[in-house]
Image: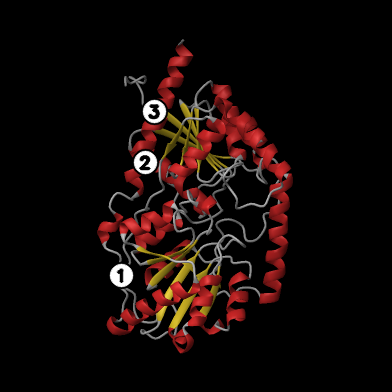
């Protein structure tokens, strides 16, 4: 395809509510694309709601190329603000108080998802649309890429695309009104969301998402051209082999240590099968230890108390991204909790790529015929199980290996081939380049 920019490089505007220095998972994909596009010679600007004081993650583009516009009015965010880690060694709040706080936050989030259109970040729609020109200082894009959720950013991108008469591309890290069952919404609210999504997508040049089942959902519901660009492994230094007791404090080296990092969603990502499996081990339950790092809404502690295995579970609460990475690298086995439902077939959480980078075997508790399960099986990087008896049998196998050799073998490095972020992003730039060139042809017609 001919180059429509013979005298300059293409200009890309990335719109993402989440972006570094925030350490949220939602910031990683747009940040990686910004860094890759810049490396490939694109002129990149980023429009975000994140301030410079909201975390410690590395910002991939110079600050003068960032356009940071805060939401207005500022609304209270449930729980700990994004990018604010719990200092190492800080104890989580008392169980009863923590459960009350988590319950109140869940109710607030559900109310926001039910009543606020398109999502609780709607207070970010007007400020960037009104103030972009001031922040951009005369700069204008050739193509706009927006990443969601939150999907308020889609409204922002569509408005700016109309203003500049340039194409825009919608990046779905997760789905919005159809195929996303993680949020409890009424039938009326889902219908309103679908109508709004269809209206916003009328002008979209293309959509991108992380798996073929999700892409097919978008095509079927909205008729939009939709491509698949997976997430990928973000390269970082390979950690050294852990020393004894590095994760569990006084845990002996013969103990099988599992770890789960990230959020636990009530009713969707349930640790109970694992907890119940540990209880089935009888006396061997004392030889298994599970570290949970991240908000769990009190679910894990309740499950451990019910099963009588609280001594086998450690709850760290939220931790910094570096601490999370260290926990993953030090574990014998990593636990990936997903929804055990056919509606989750296309979900490929970014956490699976973090786990693969750590090269520890993965225990996936979730839908056995989904994209994530297939990836683990094809790469021989872990096992998929949902019944406590099957999980207990697998734990016994790993425990026997640990007692015999002192370490569960690492996932082979070859299992990661082709799964690094840069392996995926070249395709993304092709999609954006095609959209920009098609938009330029229409503008010239």
The residue that appears at 58% across and 55% down in the rendered structure is 82
List x then y, in percent, for residue 54.
56, 53
Q: CA distance from mark 2 to mark 1?
A: 28 Å
- Identify the residue at horizontal 27%, vertical 81% (top origin): 405
If the image is split into quadrants, where does the N terminus sit?
Answer: top left
Left or right of 380, for residue 77: right
- Residue 164 at x, y = what percent? 54, 22
Residue under numbered circle 3 = 433
Density class for disc 1 (Cα within 10 Å; few <14, some 14-19, many ≥20) is: few
Q: Which residue is mark 1?
A: 240
How far across and how far down the image is residue 433, in percent?
39, 28
Asked whether the residues under the numbered discs 2 and 3 touch, taking CB atoms below 8 Å apart as contact, a structural biologist would say no
Mark 2 secondary-structure assignment:
helix
Q: Is residue 272 left or right of residue 37?
A: right
In the picture, the disc for residue 425 is 2
Residue 64 in view here? no
Toward the top, the furthest residue is 445
Q: Residue at x 70, y 75 (%)?
A: 96
Question: Which disc, if any, is residue 135?
Answer: none
Tell which of 353 and 326 is nearer to you: 353
SS label for mark 3:
helix
Q: Is residue 289 above or below residue 71?
A: below
Front residue of this view, candidates 93 and 43: 93
1 or 3: tag closer to the N-terminus: 1
Mark in the foreground, 1 or 3: 3
- List x then y, in percent, for residue 353: 40, 56
Answer above or below: position of 400 versus 134. Answer: below
Q: CA distance from mark 2 to mark 3?
A: 12 Å
Nearest to viewer (mark 2 / mark 1):
2
């Amino acid at each position: 395809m001919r180059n429509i920019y013979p005298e300059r490089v293409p200009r890309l505007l990335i719109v993402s509510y989440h972006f570094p220095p925030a350490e949220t998972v939602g910031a990683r994909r747009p940040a990686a694309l910004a860094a890759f596009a810049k490396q490939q010679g694109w002129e990149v600007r980023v429009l975000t709601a994140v301030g410079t004081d909201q975390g410690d993650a590395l910002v991939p583009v110079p600050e003068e190329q960032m356009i940071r516009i805060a939401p207005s009015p500022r609304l209270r965010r449930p729980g700990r603000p994004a990018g604010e880690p719990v200092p190492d060694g800080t104890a989580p709040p008392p169980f009863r108080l923590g459960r009350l706080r988590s319950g109140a936050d869940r109710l607030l989030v559900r109310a926001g998802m039910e009543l606020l259109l398109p999502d609780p970040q709607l207070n970010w729609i007007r400020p960037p649309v009104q103030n972009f020109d001031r922040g951009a200082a005369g700069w204008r894009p050739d193509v706009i890429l927006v990443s969601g959720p939150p999907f308020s950013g889609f409204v922002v991108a569509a408005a700016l695309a109309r203003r500049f008469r340039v194409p825009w591309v919608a990046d779905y890290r997760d789905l919005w009104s159809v195929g996303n069952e993680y949020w409890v919404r009424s039938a009326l609210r889902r219908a309103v969301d679908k109508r709004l999504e269809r209206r916003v997508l009328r002008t979209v040049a293309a959509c991108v998402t992380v798996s073929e089942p999700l892409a097919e959902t978008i095509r079927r519901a909205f008729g939009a051209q939709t491509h698949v660009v997976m997430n990928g492994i973000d390269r970082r230094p390979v950690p050294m082999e852990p020393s004894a007791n590095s994760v569990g404090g006084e845990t002996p080296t013969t103990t099988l240590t599992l770890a789960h990092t990230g959020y636990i969603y009530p009713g969707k990502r349930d640790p109970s099968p694992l907890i119940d499996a540990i209880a089935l081990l009888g006396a061997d339950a004392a030889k298994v230890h599970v570290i949970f790092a991240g908000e769990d809404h009190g679910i894990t502690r309740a499950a451990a108390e019910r099963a009588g295995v609280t001594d086998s579970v450690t709850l760290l609460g939220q931790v910094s991204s570096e601490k999370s990475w260290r926990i993953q690298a030090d574990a014998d086995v990593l636990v990936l909790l997903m929804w055990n439902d056919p509606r989750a077939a296309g979900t490929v959480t970014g956490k699976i790529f973090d786990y693969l980078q750590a090269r520890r075997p993965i225990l996936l508790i979730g839908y056995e015929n989904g994209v994530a399960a297939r990836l683990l099986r094809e790469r021989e990087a872990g096992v998929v199980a949902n019944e406590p008896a099957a999980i207990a049998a697998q734990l016994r196998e790993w425990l026997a290996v640990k007692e015999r050799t002192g370490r569960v073998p690492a996932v082979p490095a070859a299992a990661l081939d082709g799964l690094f972020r840069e392996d995926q992003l070249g395709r993304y730039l092709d999609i954006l380049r095609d959209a920009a060139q098609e938009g330029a042809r229409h503008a010239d017609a």
